[in-house]
């Protein structure tokens, strides 16, 4: 036992050996804390696989960084040097991980600011789609449009960094007011009965949007009570402009944000059927050309 006591005395009274012992013990404690954090916090409480792997990697890096700083502080005799090292390391980490840090800040802004929720239809960074997931670093949406016409899924999943909330506007199609105003253009041939054409279009619009009007009126009333906006009309509106080719009737109406395309298809079909039933009193117009004069034609017949 004497040799053990002599070793302990050397370790305790020798500055270099005591620092080495303190560094080893401190490093082991840090690694143990990191391992416990991964096993009992991250692995148990983080269900998303991608986020769990990212947090485990970040925890490992943090552990190595803490061990390095601890060992440096043990062997460093100057607190000023340690402060400088912290500053340099902080600046370097901030520069290298600026996109990650901004994305995390964006996630905090999304969580507190209620920009959108899972299931909302949004446009983020020029990408339009429905939100599938809001992660710590990225928002996942299933895309609409692009090579597919109308508000239809194209099957492509897009992950967008949360840092975009500080760089570009966020469009939400389904937040406080889950309806949209949409328009269709109906060209009517010159010479048609204008009053009858307007009555047909208005009747079809009223029948098609009858289920939306009460809900849209209630939702818009909530909007006007909460924000300083005017009391806009949610009933169908028709306006007409005459040009050289036809009478252009513009029909404006509210529609569920997920049923724009199907509603537009139904409206055109019903309006065309109603026009056909008038037996020519109202006709759908197409591009027409009128010949105003014909040059003289001379024919010579020889026997």
Image (cartoon, rainbow, N blue to C red):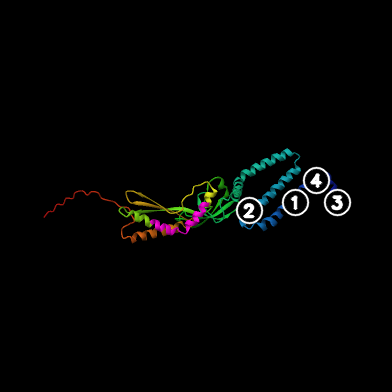
Q: Position of residue 161 (x, y in %)?
A: 57, 50
The disc at residue 29 is 1
At horizontal 37% and vertical 52% (from top left) the residue drawn is: 249
Vertical position of residue 73 compared to residue 148: above or below: above
First of labels 4, 2 by sequence position: 4
Task: Give the CA distance from mark 3 to mark 2.
Answer: 45 Å
Q: Position of residue 140 (x, y in %)?
A: 56, 54
Q: Callout 1 environment at 10 Å: few (<14), some (14 to 19), or many (20+)?
A: few
Task: Give the CA distance from mark 1 to mark 4.
Answer: 16 Å
First of labels 1, 4 by sequence position: 4
Callout 4 touching callout 2 (CB < 8 Å): no
| SS for callout 3 | helix
Stretch of the chain drawn in magenta: 201-221
Callout 1 touching callout 2 (CB < 8 Å): no
First of labels 1, 2 by sequence position: 1
Task: Give the CA distance from mark 4 to mark 3.
Answer: 15 Å
Q: Is residue 289 left or right of residue 135?
A: left
The disc at residue 18 is 4
First of labels 4, 3 by sequence position: 3
Judge depth for marks 4 and 2 and give the one in front. 2
Q: Is residue 178 visible?
A: no
Q: Position of residue 198 (x, y in %)?
A: 37, 54
């Amino acid at each position: 036992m004497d040799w053990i006591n002599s070793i302990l005395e050397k370790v305790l009274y020798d500055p270099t050996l005591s620092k080495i012992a303190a560094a080893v013990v401190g490093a082991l404690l840090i690694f143990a804390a990191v391992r416990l954090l991964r096993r009992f916090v991250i692995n148990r409480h983080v269900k998303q696989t991608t986020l769990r792997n990212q947090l485990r990697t970040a925890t490992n890096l943090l552990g190595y960084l803490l061990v390095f700083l601890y060992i440096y502080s043990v062997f460093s005799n100057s607190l000023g040097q340690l402060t400088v090292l912290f500053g340099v390391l902080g600046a370097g980490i901030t520069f290298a991980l600026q996109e990650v840090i901004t994305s995390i800040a964006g996630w905090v802004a999304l969580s507190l600011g209620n920009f959108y929720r899972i299931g909302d239809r949004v446009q983020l960074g020029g990408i339009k789609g429905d939100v599938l997931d809001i992660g710590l670093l990225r928002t996942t949406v299933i895309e609409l449009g692009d090579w597919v016409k109308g508000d239809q899924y194209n099957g492509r999943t897009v992950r967008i960094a949360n840092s975009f909330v500080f760089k570009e506007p966020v469009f939400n199609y389904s937040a406080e007011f889950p309806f949209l105003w949409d328009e269709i253009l109906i060209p009517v041939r010159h010479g048609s009965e204008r009053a009858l054409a307007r009555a047909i279009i208005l009747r079809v619009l009223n029948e098609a949007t009858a289920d939306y009007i009460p809900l849209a009126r209630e939702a818009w009333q909530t909007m006007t009570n909460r924000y300083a906006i005017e009391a806009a009309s949610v009933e169908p509106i028709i306006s007409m402009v005459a040009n050289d080719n036809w009478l252009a009737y513009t029909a404006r109406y509210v529609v569920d944000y997920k049923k724009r395309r199907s509603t537009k298809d139904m409206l055109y079909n019903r309006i065309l059927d109603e026009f056909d039933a008038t037996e020519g009193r109202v006709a759908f117009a197409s591009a027409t050309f009128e010949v105003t004069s014909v040059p003289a034609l001379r024919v010579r017949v020889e026997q």
